[in-house]
């Protein structure tokens, strides 16, 4: 055999369920050598996590696992729990998506680290403690000695993930499996964690399996890539091959569906139509055939095997597609793109300059403070959280304004303040010229609400599961008193508009997929023909291929209906694609505000620069050669009263400034300066 | 038409295919899970038989429950009087049937009443929050420390044993415990995005409570209702047993057991038949409630298993 550290052969995993056996993994094989990184990508439910759990031996007993997994010369399948745990302790480590669930809340992190260190080998108390501190230091936790006694809940998400990595490194693992290790984290923290995993790898010489849905992360980290679809690998290639000589329609679709931060021109994204199949009683056919634009009859008669593209046995680039050899670089087949490029209609208002368009929403000096309470019985106020600290902006007709920023910076609070029509003490919210301060009584409020509607992040949670789609979409109409007959035709019209079949209007939300549910949410928001639609992370809960369709829909609706969007997102690639104007928010205030191209081409504020450089770009050549600014530290807390620039604790520019200039950063709050409605930033030295 | 730019939605190539061939409806799933629970099914059968008995038996009985047969005073079960007679000459068979009927009527009325009131009050308190919520909770907590059973006994005694008044009083003192439970459940509902969404559409508060919050705790309400029946039967029995419940000539299982207990040595059938009916009723309902909980609630002991 080869000198592979881990060798998986024809691994199959199935779960019994009431509706039939779910074949979550249907035959996957690969070899992984020490020091190399295998990226596994695929949509939700494609079997990525189940594969990793099978390797770790963490699946339930009633799950059927077959095939072979050899690690370090030992067969893992069929081993008892005890034997497995010994093997795990001596060479296998796993990093999960949610760091909180992999740490025990009732033990201090020091205890958990020491336990990981001592459970499989003899080590004195002292030595274990010293080694634990050393590990925390390696993963970049500030003040490691003092942190040993802290409990997991005292840490932020990024810090917890560092602790998990420290624990993973404790036993000098030979193989580290990271399952979406950064999905729950912000981009700047993601960059830190990915660097840290790379460091852990180089220090221990371990092999890494990096499971992710983010092609950018793959481009950054992987040596080889395995694309999974419906429980099977459909393309397997070295990373450059995969990105530049893609040969399988599904992979081409995945890559075409991602918006790029580094691309200015607004091409429509290329959605992959339809949804992945359910993994029950799959027919013997290409599982992608129902979604594949170039499927031929033969695709439906037999499931293609994973074979080398160049038709030889040794080739490293393999696909499971019978038409791979016809596909050429750039995703072309017979000179045409595999996925037809959709066309987005020209915007009606594209010719009208911004100044000449009416303002649909104006926000002046919006603030929000939450009282900080303490005490179990008698709550008393011990301080204030300044969630929003005076932000102002306006949105014109037919314009998309995006607010970006890390979690906790106040994006959602801003939206809720606007949606709640909260009267401002020293500012104002104006909807189409009407101040919310002038709105009195239910009727006036309802009239105002016609013009502003919201689409939520979670397409499942935003739809009442006990109502039919027709009732859901008609609800805002009923709220403003539309008659039943009128609302019925409107529902059909709206479903048509967002690309849903109106004959399905009597179904319940659970019969629809995530992307379709989000379309229902959008249809509901459009019911009253609002002027402005507020979108709170509308695509972040969706898989990339589905996401593309929803983004295109939003683009199209804006063009057709002349809508304004107030769009909140943490994914800058999506923002670049959809927005006209962008505000970057940090700790409740805008640090930079301008047109989308100004912000992305010429970022001024150090925070914007760091944010942009932290986003992994789905192209291994670009990704691995560019300069990147990695921010140190976590997002500061909004409770801290700062006399100076709130970004100073993490600012990379601050660090290289002479002391007298640093004093200015710390002593004087930088205002958002620059010409009105132009590119403005809040840094003293930019 | 520029439709081609939007991906087709539900259609042959999407959802329909994704769903397994034999897609189970919600009700199929519930009934399948319920049927898997043998004791619950047995409970349901017993309950059905009891209801049938309460409805049909008075039609079959040779005597009605008020009629006195002076030739058969305090007789044990015989061909003439299937379950014997009381010392006054009442036919026990007829009495048990009517008593069961009465107990069931009280129990169902009370359980419907408490479930409706507790559901509306509990969810409304959670939705409207603020002052309304605090006042409601204050009232509930106050009622919790009031010795309600005593109040109930007093009032029902002075009502002259009319079962409708007794039911009303039982509703009035029975709604607040479940209301508090429902309030806690509804707290998480009020943070659901669809509730926010409805508010941002301008839907009035009470409509949101009725349209979005209540239906989504439906399974809890069904279980509460079933358990409420058991509790109401027990309370009513307790009352009547002590002599505060329904009064002669009206009978309930409780009053029958109460009077039967006095003669347990001389005429045991007067005690055992109504007691058996009561036991069957409460046990069957408890089993049904248990089965419903497993069937409707994915987080219960049966687990999220389909
Ligand atoms: N315990 C389980 N019981 C039944 N089915 C399961 C179980 N765990 C996973 N599955 C099914 O196995 C399939 C693959 O799941 P898996 O978690 O590996 O997907 P994934 O690729 O990791 O997706 P994601 O991107 O959402 O993490 C899914 O259809 C899932 O529903
Ligand atoms: S085998 Fe056929 S259906 Fe499957 S990906 Fe290739 S061309 Fe498409
Ligand atoms: S004001 Fe100073 S600390 Fe703040 S962003 Fe500018 S350089 Fe950095
Ligand atoms: Mg997963």
Image (spheres, grey):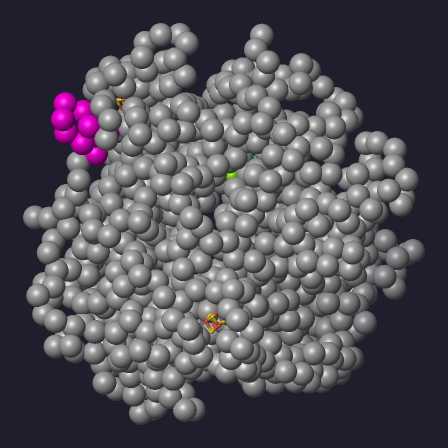
**Magenta segment boundaries in residue numbering:** A331-339
> What residue appears at the point 56 percent right and 86 percent down from the top-left corner?
B131
- Say which of A551 and B281 sits in front: A551
- Residue A65 higher or lower than B86, as above or below: above
Q: Locate residue B67 relative to residue A196 in the image: left or right.
A: right
Quarter of the image for residue A513 reads: top left
Q: Position of residue A201 (x, y in %)?
A: 61, 35
> What residue appears at the point 39 percent right and 55 percent down from the top-left corner?
A612
Q: Locate residue B235 relative to residue B122 in the image: left or right.
A: right
Is residue B123 visible in the rendered structure shown here? no
Is residue A170 visible in the rendered structure shown here? yes
Quarter of the image for residue B210 reads: bottom left
Q: Position of residue A549 (x, y in %)?
A: 27, 46
Q: Quadrant of the C terminus of chain A?
A: bottom left
> What residue appears at the point 60 percent right and 40 percent down from the top-left corner?
A199
- Say which of A458 and A616 sits in front: A616
Q: Position of residue B149 (x, y in %)?
A: 76, 76
Q: Quadrant of the N terminus of chain A?
A: top right
Q: Position of residue B289 (x, y in %)?
A: 63, 52
């Amino acid at each position: 055999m080869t000198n592979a550290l881990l060798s998986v052969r024809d691994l199959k995993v199935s779960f019994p369920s009431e509706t039939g056996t779910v074949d979550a993994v249907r035959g996957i094989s690969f070899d992984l050598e020490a020091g190399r990184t295998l990226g596994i990508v695929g949509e939700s439910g494609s079997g990525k996590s189940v594969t990793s759990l099978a390797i770790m031996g963490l699946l339930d007993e009633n799950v059927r696992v077959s095939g072979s997994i050899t690690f370090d010369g030992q067969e893992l399948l069929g081993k008892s729990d005890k034997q497995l745990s010994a093997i795990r302790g001596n060479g296998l480590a796993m990093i999960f998506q949610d760091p909180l669930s992999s740490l025990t809340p009732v033990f201090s992190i020091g205890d958990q680290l020491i336990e990981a260190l001592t459970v499989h080998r003899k080590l004195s108390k002292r030595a274990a403690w010293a080694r634990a501190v050393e590990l925390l230091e390696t993963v970049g936790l500030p003040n490691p000695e003092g942190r040993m006694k802290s409990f997991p809940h005292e840490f932020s998400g990024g810090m917890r993930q560092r602790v998990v990595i420290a624990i993973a490194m404790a036993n000098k693992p030979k193989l580290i499996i990271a399952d979406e290790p950064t999905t729950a984290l912000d981009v700047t923290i993601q960059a830190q964690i990915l660097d840290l995993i790379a460091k852990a790898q180089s220090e221990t010489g371990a092999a890494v399996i990096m499971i992710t849905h983010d092609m950018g992360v793959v481009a950054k980290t992987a040596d080889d890539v395995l694309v999974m679809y419906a429980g099977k690998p459909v393309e397997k290639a070295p990373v450059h091959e995969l990105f530049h000589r893609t040969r399988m329609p599904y992979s081409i679709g995945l890559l075409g569906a991602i918006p790029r931060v580094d691309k200015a021109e607004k091409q429509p994204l290329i959605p992959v139509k339809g949804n992945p199949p359910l993994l029950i009683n799959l027919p013997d056919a290409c599982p992608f055939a129902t979604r594949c634009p170039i499927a031929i009859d033969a695709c439906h008669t037999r499931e293609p095997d994973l074979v080398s593209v160049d038709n030889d046995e040794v080739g490293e680039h393999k696909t499971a597609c019978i038409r791979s050899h016809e596909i050429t670089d750039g995703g072309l087949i017979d000179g045409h793109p595999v996925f037809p490029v959709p066309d987005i209609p020209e915007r009606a208002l594209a010719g009208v300059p911004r100044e000449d368009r009416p303002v649909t929403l104006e926000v002046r000096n919006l603030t929000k403070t939450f009282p900080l309470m303490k005490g179990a019985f008698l709550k008393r106020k011990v301080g204030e959280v300044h969630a929003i600290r005076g932000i102002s902006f306006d949105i014109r007709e037919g314009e998309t304004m995006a607010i970006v920023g890390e979690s906790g910076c106040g994006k959602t609070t801003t939206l809720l303040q606007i949606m709640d029509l909260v009267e401002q003490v020293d500012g104002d919210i104006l909807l189409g010229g009407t101040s919310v301060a002038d709105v009195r009584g239910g009727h006036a409020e309802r009239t105002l609400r016609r013009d502003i509607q919201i689409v939520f992040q979670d397409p499942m949670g935003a739809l009442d599961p006990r109502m039919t789609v027709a009732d859901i979409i008609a609800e805002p109409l009923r709220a403003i008193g539309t008659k039943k007959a009128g609302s019925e035709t409107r529902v059909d019209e709206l479903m048509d508009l967002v690309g849903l079949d109106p004959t399905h209007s009597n179904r319940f939300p659970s019969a629809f997929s995530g992307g379709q549910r989000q379309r229902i949410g959008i249809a509901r928001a459009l019911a009253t023909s609002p002027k402005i639609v507020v979108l709170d992370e509308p695509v972040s809960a969706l898989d990339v291929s589905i996401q593309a369709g929803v983004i295109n829909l939003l683009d199209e609706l804006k063009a057709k209906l002349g809508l304004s969007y107030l769009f909140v997102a943490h994914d800058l690639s999506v923002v670049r694609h959809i927005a006209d104007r962008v505000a970057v928010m940090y700790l409740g205030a805008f640090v930079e505000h301008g047109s989308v191209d100004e912000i992305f081409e010429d970022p001024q504020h150090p925070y914007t620069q760091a944010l942009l450089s932290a986003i992994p770009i789905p192209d291994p050549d670009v990704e691995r050669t560019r300069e990147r600014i990695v921010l140190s530290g976590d997002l500061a807390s909004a409770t801290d009263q700062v006399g100076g620039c709130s970004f100073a604790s993490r600012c990379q520019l601050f660090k290289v400034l002479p002391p007298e200039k640093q004093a200015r950063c710390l002593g004087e709050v930088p205002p958002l300066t620059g010409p009105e409605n132009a590119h403005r930033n809040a840094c003293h030295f930019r | 038409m520029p439709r081609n730019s939007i991906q087709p939605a539900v259609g042959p190539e999407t959802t329909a295919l994704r769903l397994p061939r034999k897609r189970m409806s919600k009700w199929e799933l519930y009934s399948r899970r319920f049927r898997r629970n043998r004791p619950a099914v047995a409970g349901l059968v017993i309950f059905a038989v009891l209801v049938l008995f309460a409805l049909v038996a008075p039609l079959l009985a040779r005597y009605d429950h008020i009629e006195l047969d002076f030739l058969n005073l305090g007789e044990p079960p015989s061909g003439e009087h299937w379950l014997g007679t009381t010392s006054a000459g009442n036919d026990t068979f007829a009495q048990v049937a009517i008593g069961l009927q009465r107990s069931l009527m009280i129990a169902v009325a009370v359980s419907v009443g408490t479930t409706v009131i507790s559901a509306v009050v509990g969810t409304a308190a959670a939705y409207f929050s603020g002052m309304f919520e605090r006042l409601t909770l204050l009232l509930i907590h106050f009622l919790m420390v009031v010795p309600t059973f005593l109040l109930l006994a007093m009032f029902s005694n002075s009502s002259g044993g009319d079962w409708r008044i007794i039911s009303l009083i039982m509703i009035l003192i029975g709604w607040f415990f479940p209301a508090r439970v429902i309030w806690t459940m509804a707290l998480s509902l009020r943070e659901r995005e669809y509730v926010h969404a409805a508010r941002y559409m301008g839907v009035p508060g009470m409509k949101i409570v009725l349209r979005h919050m209540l239906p989504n705790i439906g399974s809890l309400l069904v279980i509460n209702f079933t358990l409420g029946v058991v509790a109401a039967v027990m309370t009513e029995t307790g009352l009547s047993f002590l002599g505060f419940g329904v009064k002669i000539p009206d009978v309930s299982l409780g009053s029958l057991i109460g009077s039967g207990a006095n003669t347990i040595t001389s005429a045991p059938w007067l005690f055992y038949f109504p007691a058996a009916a009561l036991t069957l009723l409460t046990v069957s309902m408890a089993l049904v409630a248990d089965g419903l909980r497993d069937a409707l609630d994915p987080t219960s002991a049966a687990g999220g298993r389909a």
